[in-house]
Image: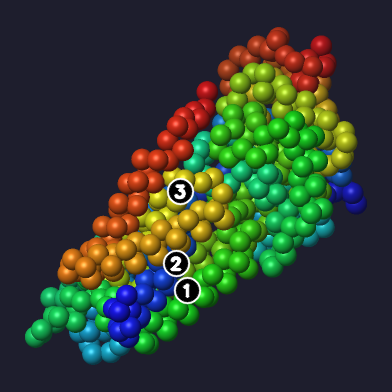
Amino acid sequence: MSDAVISIKDAVVSYREDVALQGVSLEVHRGEFIGIIGPNGAGKTTLLTVINGLGRLVQGEVRVLGLPVNEQNGIKLRRRIGYVAQVENIDPRLPINVRETVMVGSYGRLGLFHRPTAAHWASVDRMADMVGIAHLVQRPIGHLSGGEYQRAAIARAIVQEPDIFLLDEPTASIDERAQWEILDLIQRIHRKYGMTTLFVTHDLRQLPAVCERLVLMKEGRIWRQGKPESMLKKDVLSQLYGVPVSMPRQTGSASWLHSSQ
Amino acid sequence: MSVLEYQFMQNAVLAGLCGGITCSIVGVFVVTMHLSFIGVCIAHAAFAGALLGVWLGFDPLIGALVFSLASAGIIGPMADRGELNLDTSIGIVFSLMLGLAFLFLGLMSGSRTEALNLFWGSILTVSHRDLAFLGAVTAAEIGLVLAFYKEILAVICHRQVALAVGIPATLIFYGLLFATGLTITASLQSIGGLLIYTLILNPAAAAYQLTYSLKRMLLIASAFGVVSCWAGLTASYLLDIPSGASIVITSCIIFALATAFSPKRKVKRWQQA
């Protein structure tokens, strides 16, 4: 397809004896929102790292935004890819505040020897406002709660003005209310900017309603993929996880499961 | 003070200024990245290299430079490409350098005065050449911090994020390790192999207690480093005690005071649910 912004062909990634990806092929089109689910160790995070060039391919080919992903293009591509990982436990004494942390998103594109201008700082403040942390910008980054930290991480990724947005379990390890707020925020951002988005989660309730395609991963392979309504079925999910799965009931409006019920 | 009219004292004051600033700057990097032990490791590497120079009769400064830069160059890739975490790779390089230092010391024949001077350093007898080298390293380091401030901030606070947004984070990280090696080599003659890492660690660790801004931390740490050197020199002159020891003890006192009055002590560590 000509509008494929991500094209993965037969990707194999191995960490010593463990094969994390075993011949994965996937095409992602411009503006798509793809959910990636599967049990722990299925290769979901590894799939994201081969897209932004931080994972090492043993075999196969990955093209992103028209460029082959390799050592030469890695940095260039990462400047156009926003990445939000799981919330991390950071040192509360770290000498950097929220505003500076969000600004880090623009540093790759700015390049060496270029300082951020007033326009860049204005953009940081706008994004902080959009994600609801305008009142926290002067706080040390280590003083934020998990939900606040993830908002700052999302603001940082948007400041980057990315073409592709990769989210690796962004709602893991944060409380229920913060999870729904983050999900809602991610959907608002997708509707506003229309970025090609890949959203990884192992929690089925955390699948955003805006998700158009669902990729089910198991043991380093893409096991199935399709529309969420055809994938989110009790028998399919029970096979995926290897245990009987009951469909969650209590979900917020930001969740795909809620929107389909 | 008439003592400042002496050339050796002027040199010592200048060495204290440059050594205090440059050691504190790299100290800010290693303390923020929680890699304080790297100072100990590279100091021993520089010491081993200098001892090799003394033993084989070539310039100890060259030996120190080669060994400290080599160890800085080994630690980063060893942790990044191997199966070890950074702490382990630093520990292994440290033990190797300590072993080599003892080996070279043991193989030396005759007087070991020059070798032992490298242990303690001698800020009062620092030569013009050592001072010029220290001054050049200090100026280069300040220039690099000004030129790459935003990249350094990103790498020492959020290395994985820096990598993900397209900053050449690995290059910057290895550059910081090299700067540490260079700083230690340049300060070896005046501060000494055993004492140098306290001058790297203590002023930066004290500044870490007092501010949440990297810019302020760099300035405070540099000021603490210079004050440690100058106050230590003064104490050494007035009390007739070894200058290296008085510099280190002063920096420890500054750290203790900064910790006692730290506003960050009230911060409760955020724990994940």
Q: Nearer the viewer, residue B43 or B162?
A: B43
Q: Chain of mark 2?
A: B
Of the numbered discs 3 and 1, the one sitting upstream in the chain is 1
For label 2, the crowd category at 10 Å Cα-Cα, with few meaning under 14, some 14 to 19 and many 20 or more, is many
* Residue for point 20% across, 76% down: B117
| Residue found at the very far bottom of the displayed protein | B57
For label 1, the crowd category at 10 Å Cα-Cα, with few meaning under 14, some 14 to 19 and many 20 or more, is many
Which residue is identified by label 2?
B21
Residue B76 position within the rendered picture, expressed as x and y whole percent measured from the top left: 46, 62
Mark 3–mark 1 distance (CA, rounded to whole Å): 21 Å
Quadrant of the rendered image containing residue A61: bottom right
Which residue is identified by label 3?
B208
Which residue is identified by label 1?
B138
For label 3, the crowd category at 10 Å Cα-Cα, with few meaning under 14, some 14 to 19 and many 20 or more, is many
Q: Secondary structure at mark 1?
A: helix
* Residue for point 63% across, 58% down: B150
Q: Are circles 1 and 2 on residues that touch, CB within 8 Å?
A: yes
Of the numbered discs 1 and 2, the one sitting upstream in the chain is 2
| Residue found at the very far right of the displayed protein | A2
